[in-house]
Image: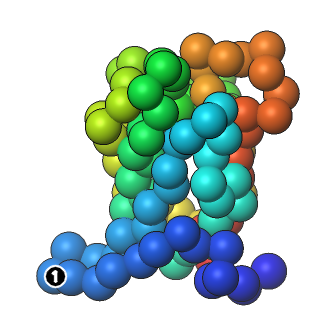
Amino acid sequence: MSNMSNMNSTSSGSNGTQANIVIENGTFDPSLLTVTPGTTVVWTVKDLTGKYMVTSNKTNNGMNLFMSDDLTNGKSFNYTFNQTGTFDYYDMDHKNNKTLVGTIIVQ
């Protein structure tokens, strides 16, 4: 699945590629993102009333690959994906809301 159109936006610079995900109205936009290794994904909250915690599903060793602090309107969190694979994540603050999930595919 090599559809880069899933990316909300990208830019290249001396530090590699960046892809952006907006958190707004209780959703990740886009919720499915395909990137190349070395891409930094930036989640930014654009929601005046929400509080979010971007959290990866646990890995084989039982640890989370990444977990943000609590994010409110205007705050961002980023993580650089260096390994190929499929990385599912969710909003820890709304963990019972099964619709607030996303997937990053690194290939």
| Image height of 96 relative to 76, above or below | above
- Residue for badge 1: 14
Q: Which residue is located at x 44 percent, y 67 percent?
A: 19
- Quadrant holding the N terminus: bottom right
Q: Position of residue 106 (x, y in %)?
A: 60, 69
Check disc 1 and give the amino acid type. Answer: Ser
Q: Secondary structure at mark 1?
A: loop
Q: Is residue 80 left or right of residue 15?
A: right
Residue drawn at x 54%, y 69% is 8
In the picture, measured across the screen, residue 66 lies left or right of residue 33, that is: left
Locate residue 2 relative to residue 99 in the image: left or right: left
Neighbor class of circle 1 (other Cα within 10 Å; few <14, some 14-19, many 20+) is few
Instruction: Mark yes or no: residue 47 visible.
Output: yes
Compared to 83, does 68 lie above or below? above
Answer left or right for 27 relative to 83: right
Q: Nearer the viewer, residue 59 or 103?
A: 103
Q: Residue at x 29, y 84 (%)?
A: 12
Q: For the view shown, which residue lies furthest in the left direction?
A: 14
